[in-house]
Amino acid sequence: MNFPILSSLILLPTIGALFILFTKSSSGKYQSSKYVALFISLANFLLSLYLWYVFDKNSVDFQFVENREWLSGFINYKVGIDGISILFIILTTFITPICIISVNATIKNRLKDFLIAILIMETFMIGVFCSLDLVVFYLFFEAGLIPMFLIIGIWGGERRVYSAFKFFLYTLLGSVLMLVAIISIYWITGTTDVEKLYELGIKAEYQNLLWLAFFSSFAVKTPMWPVHTWLPDAHVEAPTVGSVLLAAILLKMAGYGFIRFSIGLFPIASENFTMLVYILSLIAIIYTSLVALMQEDMKKLIAYSSVAHMGFVTLGIFTMTQQGIEGSIFQMISHGLVSAALFLSVGVVYERHHTRLINKYGGLVSIMPRYAIVFMVFTLGALGLPGTTGFIGEFLILMGAFEKNILVAMIASLGVILGAAYMLWLFKRVVFGEINNQELKSMKDLKTFEIITLSALVIPILFFGFYPEPLMNSIEASVENTLNMYNFDLINNLASKD
Amino acid sequence: MENFQYILPEIFISVSIMLFLLVGVFKKNSASLIYNLSNISLVILLALIINLSSLDTVYLFNNSYLIDNLSNYMKIILVGSGIFVMLTGSKYIQVINLNKIEYPILILSSILGMMIMISSNDLIVFYMGLELQSLALYVLASFNRDNLLSTESGLKYFVLSALSSGLLLYGCSLTYGFSESTNFDQILINSTEFNYGTTFGIVFILVGLAFKISAVPFHMWAPDVYQGSPTSVTLFFAILPKIAALCVFIKFLYTPFANMNDQWQTIIVFISIASMIFGAVAAIGQKNLKRLIAYSSISHMGYALAGLATVSNQGIQSSITYISIYLVMNLAFFSCLFMLKRNDKYYENIEDLSGLSKKHPILSFSLLIVLFSLAGIPPLAGFFAKFYVFLAVIEQSMYFLAIVGLLATVVAAFYYLRIIKIIYFDPEKEEYETSHNLGLKITLAISTIFILAYFIYPSGITEIVSKITMI
């Protein structure tokens, strides 16, 4: 391994951001900075596809590992990927160019700053999914707050300040406890290197507290009920592109963290707290679905549906079954695509009509037929119709849940029905029906760049919905390995007790 | 005479002070000249100290003066930040008509006092240095004598500081009485047995020192003095006395009182927690930036003390790293403050920053970096400062201190975010002047780049500091 391909992936967007900082644009339109950003993010996407191509899907080891001395003596800069992280990296590099293309519609002022913020954000997001050292992970995990705070605060809606503060402080509060846990792990085991920690294991007596500390951070980020309240605010007030990034990628950091750290490092504690996660997940699924039903604001509805979908994800992860975890990963990828698409779709009508209230719309199918079609695909994807990615994720999660606890699985299945209810009702109210509002008639159908971005999202949603094999292939070995280690640790622990 | 070379920096600066005083008396309108000369002499002083820093530990004057890794490092950052303080403030004192010959001379004498404090290995030498720096600081605080706030701050600082010096002296005399020596090493040897007299001595000395670094509950002077003093003096207050006092803290705790750590550890932990929490909470309601930074410095001192509470070399090193990064952040923050000038008037209220980012993108970006760094958000330098401290604190299993400290950072993040909100989210106001003197620009550029790029090579300071071992 000579060429540091992961570090290039991480650094490329930042280099692009520096370029943009120094590009001069004639007129206020910043076309050249936009092209630079698009070029860099597409290059990064291609690089990540290449990475997927050369990635050995059958190996359970971390690949492309780079290990450099960093904090003298104690902590190394270590990055590397396995089958789980590669999908999230591709998701990130895929969503970022889409965000950059859609920037035109939503961002009216200070475009250059916005592009820089997005590219810096991409660096941090890829860093989170690559890092194999707890401190490096924490660094990237927290650093993402800065650009996101600015994105919500500068370019957001009316209550942007409140939302930005709430987002920042909630997440920071959750994360500081994780920092305590990371430092404690360093002093307990003498390392923060994830690979070494997998080998060494952490003593059972410490695991419960450490697990809770990590949980406090991930639960806020996921977000799980009852600390989900920042999400609807942040989503509603963020600009469209900000919501896309937040829903598609930022929320996935926590799910990824659960699999990589909570299960990987603290198997015994994870077993102890399974019921807690089940209960919180079920509340998230049922309660936020009901809340979503009653929303009058489209973005808020989708935000609550995100909480419900992430409830499925946490439920699936903590079933500790092959199907459950694979389903959760699939669900995260699927939700990344679908929620991004839904927010973009909302952005399309918001930009034309300047309101997100559902009752101001209706009958769009006769004015914007093409929009109606793509929006339908996304709606169906969100409610998990067979043939879309949403179905496979939810199906596998429920399979995993049935294996472990039938009652939990039954309650979770109710969530699927509620999901169909609020999504279809939303679709009915916005797209079908009579045109009550005469102003709507002047709305134009999709523009070229909207067709590009939305169809770029339709394709993977349908393709992987019918043919999930490529994704499943790459996660299978890693998930199996994670579960094997997990079960091995549990058995060892039981043996040591007897 | 063979020891002459070791004390050369101190001799050099004393001679320069006297020389500049003579020049000032006999040459009319020589304020600017002396200001520049003082700056040059500080640079030479820095070179002299660096020249000495390769040496091993040296005891001078009958073991009452000590030159070792700790004192060398502290003097280097002290004088280094002194140079930057002079560079950034030069335009400011001209604009507000404070460019008098006494100003640089007082700064130099105060630095001399601090250098003596840092190197002292004896209660009397220590007290001498302390009083020299304090006397200069009283005058500096009220230097803008036509300004009501400035005179008030000078008087307040004088009264409270005199009180604390009294307590300190009382502590010193108790310690002397019960351990029969004023020499630090001798006190350590004589205080193996527990006795109440020395314990009281420790408490009084710690109270006096806590006053000097404005730790809760002896912080009352800080907000008023910070706000009232001329901004360049506030910058001086925010950095240099803190370095010296922290160094003396380390010296006292780990040389004469090293055997009695079970006596003072609880006190330090309490002071540390109280400072972190109070600094974070009290800053929320502030409207004046200087006042706000005073509260912020109180909470930062809490973190620096948390490292000292650990009774480990790692903890001491983390505190020293903390103060090094803290001083860079303060330099950057005050440089930004000096740039808020319009028509020969400096602005220092938070509202004056409203919408700054639209007209002054670079200045706002620097402020953004500094504020996030002060809040301790990775990957900026401020995060690493806190990280090292908590690494040391958790090593000693002091989880309560660590968790309280980290929760206080969340509270503190709120008021830093509020400033960022005003800079970036609020409607813009009038433009500020954009032409600034070179020293100010260089200071801001260097300090911002330091904060921003610290994560690329974070072991730099750590490696230097790791030579400092006290236990």
Image (cartoon, coloured by chain):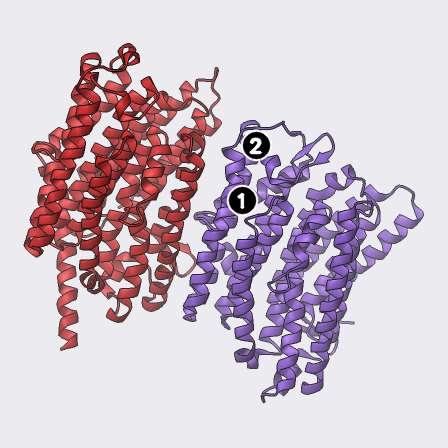
Chain colours: A red, B purple
Question: Which of the pair B70/B206 is nearer the observer?
Answer: B206
Determine contact: label 1, label 2, CB under 8 Å. no
Q: Residue at x 35, y 61 (%)?
A: A181
Total numbered labels placed on residues in the image: 2
Is A158 placed left or right of B360 in the picture?
left
Is A433 placed left or right of B14 in the picture?
left
Q: Percent position (x, y) of residue A122?
A: 34, 37
Residue A68: tell me if it is visible: no
Residue A56, compared with residue A420, is above or below; it is below
Q: Residue at x 60, y 76 (%)?
A: B255
Question: Which of the pair A121/A395 is nearer the observer?
Answer: A395
Q: Which residue is mark 2?
A: B356
Q: Percent position (x, y) of residue B370?
A: 54, 44
Residue B361, labelled with which disc? none
Residue A402: tell me if it is visible: yes
How busy is the neighbourhood of tag 1: few (under 14 within 10 Å), some, or many (20 plus)?
A: many
How busy is the neighbourhood of tag 2: few (under 14 within 10 Å), some, or many (20 plus)?
A: many
Question: Which of the pair A275/B78 is nearer the observer?
Answer: A275
Q: Residue furthest top?
A: A442
Mark positioned earlier in the residue sequence (1 or 2): 2
Tell me the quarter of the picture where residue A201 sits. Answer: bottom left
Q: Amino acid at mark 1?
A: Val
Marks 1 and 2 belong to one chain = yes
Q: Which residue is mark 1?
A: B370
Q: Amino acid at mark 2?
A: Leu
Q: Quadrant of the N terminus of chain B?
A: bottom right
Q: Residue at x 19, y 39 (%)?
A: A54
Q: Quick one: SS at disc 1?
A: helix
Q: Chain of mark 2?
A: B
Q: Quick one: SS at disc 2?
A: helix
